[in-house]
Image: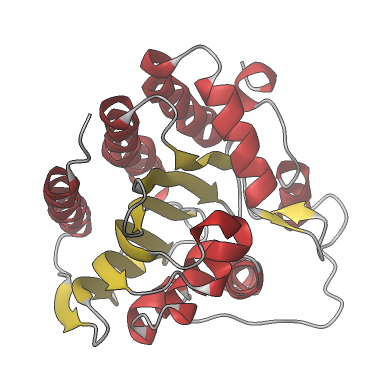
Amino acid sequence: MPVKKEEVRQFLLGLQDTICRALERCEGEARFVADAWQRQEGGGGESRVLSGGQIFEQAGVNFSHVMGAQMPASATAHRPELAGRSFEAMGVSLVIHPNNPFVPTTHANVRFFIAEKPGEASVWWFGGGFDLTPYYPFDDDVKHWHQVAQALCQPFGEQRYAEHKRWCDEYFYLKHREETRGVGGLFFDDLNASGFEQSFAYMQAVGNGFLEAYLPIVERRQSHPYGERERQFQLYRRGRYVEFNLVYDRGTLFGLQSGGRTESILMSMPPLVRWQYQYQPEPDSAEGRLAQYLTPRDWLTELA
């Protein structure tokens, strides 16, 4: 089965449009500002950022399609057989930082890589996923998030959700904090064993499933009352998001090492954040309750 790069590209461009329109409808007044860019080594993309909204303090939805003569070190460390190959990488990546601390931060990404070398077969794969980072978790929200994830995985095998949920828990883990970044979701990489059509179909299902998973949570929590205490806790916990993205995230490392556009890569950073030395939440507080959610759990069983 041939690799249909242009079909993947068109899906990704459409997905960026769909997600931006949906977030704007949710927001009401604020709009995304589009910023098209070109990469000197090859390719380019369009970054779209919504700032200062009533619901979303900052939301970024980026499309990129870049090429290079050599795979960057972050990729060859993960896949050493790719050394010496040229590459194309395309994807949509988004991060949403809401104003209200009771609305979770979220991230989603779907991507396609192809690495080529004269005289040898192309090496390609899909990757992606979505994850949820609440500050004040609600069981109904966590259950809904994972129910959507499980349902979209179902057509691709009985074990797909369990495998990619576990991969998400393991990937979005801050080793130096001994905690997960949030309540997880789905994560996958190097997906090609089932052939191009099936792999592409799954990537599409994940991309298309994001809004179904996230928007109902936004609608339920966007008007929840909060004060300065909750806001300060949100800003403190955003620091964990920064730590993960700068220390562990493969996409951030790949983008920076491959000469990507720094402004677009670091779009994932929250607009405001704080750190506090040796912060400890009060015992039995709403802030202290978060720790119960920062370890891998079988959410669908435990929250049944």
- Figure check: 280 above or below 201: below
Rendering coords of residue 172 (x, y %): 63, 52
Rendering coords of residue 279 (x, y %): 82, 74
Rendering coords of residue 30 (x, y %): 17, 70
Rendering coords of residue 230 (x, y %): 60, 65
- Figure check: 148 above or below 94: above
Question: With 10 as the anchor, is 58 left or right in this view?
Answer: right
Question: With 175 as the anchor, is 29 left or right in this view?
Answer: left
Q: Pick the quarter of the image with the C terminus.
A: top right
Of 208 and 121, nearer the camera is 121
Residue 223 visible to the viewer = no
Residue at point 14%, 79% (across, down): 36
**Residue 300, quarter of picture:** top right
Q: Pick the quarter of the image with the N terminus.
A: top left
Residue at point 22%, 40% (across, down): 3
Of 177 and 164, nearer the camera is 164
Residue at point 39%, 85% (across, down): 262
Residue that protrudes farthest toward the front in the picture: 119
Residue 60 visible to the viewer = yes
Residue that protrudes farthest toward the top in the picture: 158
Of 77 and 276, nearer the camera is 77
